[in-house]
Image (tube, rainbow, N blue to C red):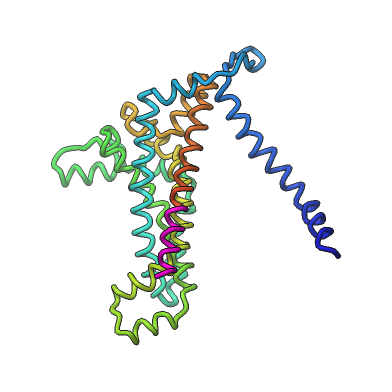
Amino acid sequence: MSRRRRARTGWLFASPALLAITAVTVFPVLFSVLLSFADVRLEYGGFRILSLTGDHYAAVLSSPEWRQALAFTFGFTAVTVLLELVLGTAAALVLERLGAARGWVLAVLLLPWALINVVAAQLWGYLYNGTYGGLTWLFTQILGHQPDILGQPASAMGAMVVVDVWKTTPFVAIVVLAGLMLIPGDVYEAAEIDGAGTWTTFWKVTLPQLRPIMAIAVLFRILQAFGIFDLPFVLTQGGPGTATESLAILGYKTLFQNLAIGRGAAVATTTAVIVITCCLLFLRVFKAQADEGGRA
């Protein structure tokens, strides 16, 4: 079979999947971008596009609610991804040294990750409850007064960071553990012969070898954390006030509660552009560091 014929056969088999992806992913994204520029009128049987305008973007970018949601989303993403990377790497290093117990420990670690996000958020909501919450009772005994964990901006954000780190660190640990298992043993033997200590071996040997797999884990976590919706929606509904309102919740409220279709689509589109830009910048910095490490 010629190369051109194999290529045609490959495209023929891939075309149903490509059509499905186009129908369920590409078309909705393009339609959302179109709506973000549209002056939309709601009618009894649906909606009608009256004209195209850029006013939605001007309104979104100048709105204090959007800036507050952007600041919360950026802060939440930065703090959770950093904590999960550090804790996940530490957990992976411990798991690598476990023998027969590794499988059992991994199974226990995966329990939080296996929970549905809404269920996990509701469970932690019980613990944070101001009337009967276990953590509220514990902090009352320690502090001497009853804290309103989800009723104050700083403690509410901290509570969400705790839940997200608790739930997602196992994912980072498993990804990093897979990278650790791929590092050849002779590298460590060479470091030992050179007299490298534990910290030097980790910093000069293990960490550089883990950079590619850690970059993948961080990329996945940025994409997930930046789109956070269910956690603040269940725990605080974006409150107190708008202190924990993420960009996803702002888009949901604008689109489905206020029925501002064009403006809600503009929130969604700006969020997608920001997260894609962040990921591309991260990959560029990572590639530059990898090239520099390769030359060294």
Residue 27 appears left or right of 90: right
Residue 268 appears left or right of 232: right
Residue 11 appears left or right of 290: right
Q: Is residue 83 magenta?
A: no
Q: Tell me the quarter of the picture where residue 70 sits.
A: top left
* Residue displayed at 81% across by 54% down: 8
Stretch of the chain drawn in magenta: 284-296
Residue 9 location in percent, x, y? Answer: 82, 56
- Which residue is at the front of the view, 98 or 280? 280
Residue 35 location in percent, x, y? Answer: 59, 24
As drawn, 115 above or below 266: below
Question: Which residue sits furthest right?
Answer: 1
Q: Is residue 293 magenta?
A: yes
- Which residue is at the front of the view, 242 or 9? 9
As drawn, 207 above or below 119: below
Residue 246 location in percent, x, y? Answer: 40, 34
- Which residue is at the front of the view, 183 or 236? 183
Main secondary structure found in the magenta portion:
helix
Question: Which residue sits furthest bottom?
Answer: 193
Residue 90 location in percent, x, y? Answer: 35, 64
Question: Which residue sits furthest front?
Answer: 295
